[in-house]
Image (cartoon, rainbow, N blue to C red):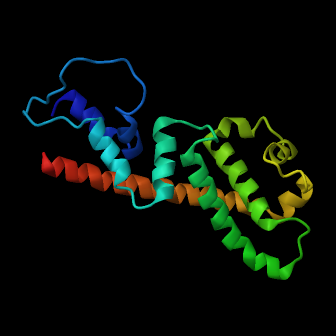
Amino acid sequence: MNAVAEKTEKLSNIEWLGQQLRAKTANYEAGIPSTGETPINWEDRCGAIASLPNKETKAYASILVWGDLRDNTQQYKDLTDYIAEYLWRMVQDELDKQRETFNMVTFCQHVARMELFYSLRPHLREYHTLKGRLVFSGINYIEPNTYSKRYAWLGNAVELLLKELQNEIETYVGNYRSKLKKAS
């Protein structure tokens, strides 16, 4: 096995997925393996994203691969909507126990946007206070103390959900890579 193939084998599935899909310097040399098989190209990697089972995993994979963290893309919106819907299902049980003075659907959307933003940029979390994160995300109708006592668990739920999505992406892309190896 040559050095390039060994390096490719050691990559995580998400790193492998983004290997030829990110901006880079053009390389005009033909990358034909010494065995004569056809090399895996960017179309194969796009096929791995297309093979993901649902819209939210495709969106999250696209965000992770291309690193496009802008909140005005369709992928970002799809993922935020999915997280907000997930949070809404979780807090509906809590609504029966207590009465809120704000729109819980909007609140779930704001929490989803905040947690996604800071999970994609973990280095910023330490520089922003809880109050700053809440106001930045549009949650200026709850005191930070109230949020940390009653709703901080939603942030943990989003973190677990994103980890599950990432594991799902790793699994599906790993299966796709295995099929590509068998086909060549």
Relative to 110, residue 9 above or below? above
Question: Which percent across, then down, holds residue 5?
Answer: 22, 34
Q: Nearer the viewer, residue 79 or 180?
A: 79
Instruction: Tell whether 16 sits left or right of 130.
Output: left
The residue nearer to you, when weighing 154 against 138, is 138
- 46 left or right of 138 in image: left
Question: How many numbered marks appear?
Answer: 0
Please indicate whether residue 12 sits to the left or right of residue 2 in the image.
right
Quadrant containing the N terminus is top left
Q: Is residue 58 above or below residue 28?
A: below
Instruction: Report whether 141 appears left or right of 23.
Output: right
In terms of image quadrants, where is residue 43?
top left
Residue in view at x 42 percent, y 54 percent: 169
> Could you tell me which residue is drawn at 91 percent across and 55 percent down?
141
Residue drawn at the location 81% of the way across and 77% of the way down = 95
**Quadrant the C terminus occupies:** top left
Please report the residue visible at 48 percent of the width from the left and 36 percent of the height from the top: 66
Q: Is residue 124 above or below residue 102?
A: above
Residue 21 image offset from top left, x and y in percent:
38, 33
Q: Percent position (x, y) of residue 48?
A: 33, 49
